[in-house]
Image (tube, rainbow, N blue to C red):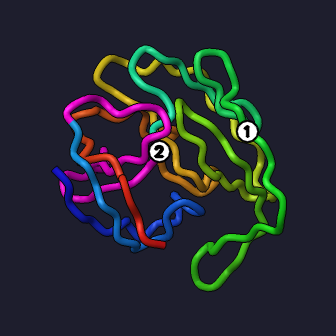
Amino acid sequence: ICFRVVHDGTRAMQPTIAPKKTMLLYRFASAPSPGDVVVFRRPDSKHRVMTRRVIAVAGQTVELRNKHVVVDGKALPQRSLPGRCSFDRGGGKRRACVTYEERAGERSYEVIRDATAPAMKVKKVEVPEGFVYVLGDNRDHSYDSRAFGPIVVGSIKGRVVWWAN
């Protein structure tokens, strides 16, 4: 089953999905995989949804050390991407950033980090059965599992299979 939704107004998924863009979702029967972009019910609201990337699934451990996401004791592969980078912080304010390609599971994707933000550090978390750990692609400006913990698979509305930027 496929259906359309509009991405929330946040910048958490930049550079992958811009705020307020249309997305096509596929409602899957099985659990999502690392690297999937999913839309799910916000943990603090029954009616609002969020869009984030699955980084780890049940049984895996996740931690963030400096600028690296570490799953099951191994840093996710990443490589710097050339070129200038800036992102919209809202209100027309631009911030310098660094862009890199990261790989989770079978998927590669772009991630941005605020060039002025301190290094990330999150203690190791084991993802419980029936849950997934999600992060935004705009790593330093995303409300995600670092704040609210792993999310329940049952709160996922679907996997994003297409978006319009």
* Neighbour tally class for label 2: few under 14, some 14-19, many 20 plus, Cα within 10 Å: many
Quarter location, residue 162: bottom left
Q: Residue at the location (61% across, 26% down)? A: 63
Is 38 inside the magenta-drawn segment? yes
Q: Residue at the location (35% across, 34% down)? A: 32
Q: Residue at the location (53% across, 30% down)? A: 105
Q: Could you tell me residue 2's position as x and y percent?
A: 20, 55
Q: Residue furthest bottom?
A: 92
Q: Which mark is residue 78?
A: 1
**Please, is residue 126 above or below residue 107 in the view?**
above
The residue tagged 2 is: 53
Select label 1 or label 2 by which is in front.
1
Q: Which region is colored magenta?
A: 29-53
How far apart marks 1 and 2 lie (CA) works out to 16 Å
- Asked if labels 2 and 1 touch by Cβ distance under 8 angstroms, the answer is no
Tag 2: amino acid: Arg
Determine the secondary structure under disc 1.
Answer: strand
